[in-house]
Amino acid sequence: MLEASRRGQRRRSICGRDAGQGSNLVIDSAALYRESRERIAAFVRSTTEEQRAVVVPGCPEWTVSDTVAHLAGGAVDIVAGYSVATISTDEHTANQVKQRRGRSLEEVLAEWESVAEGVERIIAAQTLPIELVSDVLSHEADIRGALGAGRPPKAAWMAALNLGRPRLTKRLGHLGELTIIDGEDCITVGSGKPATIVEVDLYDFWRSALGRRSRKQMTAWKWSGDFEPYLQEIPVLGPTQMALSEPP
């Protein structure tokens, strides 16, 4: 009891403010998708053929060009009426990439742009799961990380983290209360006992939730409480086998 009280006091003293700004946070998901697509297009256009052929560690079977092909293919499929569940299967994503091999980068980007407005309308109508928005931001980070080009803008990945927060709470809530602390910012997921605290860069936590950090990397975070159950539950598809990072 005393230890739990101390953890609560420590959480309140360290956690200066909710990084999600509580219930007042409003996220324009369609704009988040559009801006990420535009950043990806501008960035990959600036790369060389050699860079486009670099394997993306976060998607080890794909190159940079393949990853863009997947994003374009996913957008085309969404507008065509496929569900996110269908287009997210390994077989379907492999076909998205295969169908676009042999096309130029400009052709693939033009195809993506041609359906982007339709995707944004569907997102704005809230008839798509947030995974689609998370997917494009995640792959933006994958591509930039593969080429040593830093991270997406903080405002973008923080919005993506908060957009996925309700699902994260649903996934982790049975484990008790988890408070993620990054300097003066924090996010609390779940409630009740046990109460667990982890001090980690919120960017790394966001990437881990999308399966882009290894179990060893997550274990190395500064934990207080029983963290073992979280190592498998935080990543939606499980942790990556290799250590990944995208320095600022």
Image (spheres, helix red, strand yellow):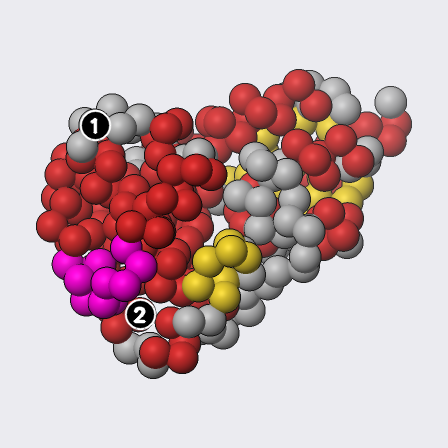
In the image, is residue 236 above or below residue 246?
Answer: above
Q: Does residue 214 appear in this view? A: yes
Q: Give above or below for 235 relative to 157.
A: above
116 horizontally vs 87: left or right: left
In-front residue for pair 227/1: 227
Which residue type carries mark 2?
A: Val
Q: CA distance from mark 1 to mark 2?
A: 28 Å
Q: Residue at x 41, y 54 (%)?
A: 139
Is residue 170 toward the left or the right of residue 232 in the image? left
Picture residue at 40% right of the left edge, 79% below the top: 50
Mark seen at residue 81: 1
Identify the disc placed on residue 50: none
- What residue is shown with label 2? 44
Instruction: Confirm whether the magenta stretch covers residue 159.
Output: no
Element class at badge 2: helix
Residue 207 position within the rendered picture, expressed as x and y whole percent measured from the top left = 54, 50
The segment highlighted magenta reads: 100-110
Q: Tell me the element at label 1.
A: loop
State the image coordinates of residue 135 (x, y, percent, origin top left).
40, 44
Residue at 20% x, 52% y: name it: 112
Relative to residue 197, is residue 66 depicted above or below? Answer: below
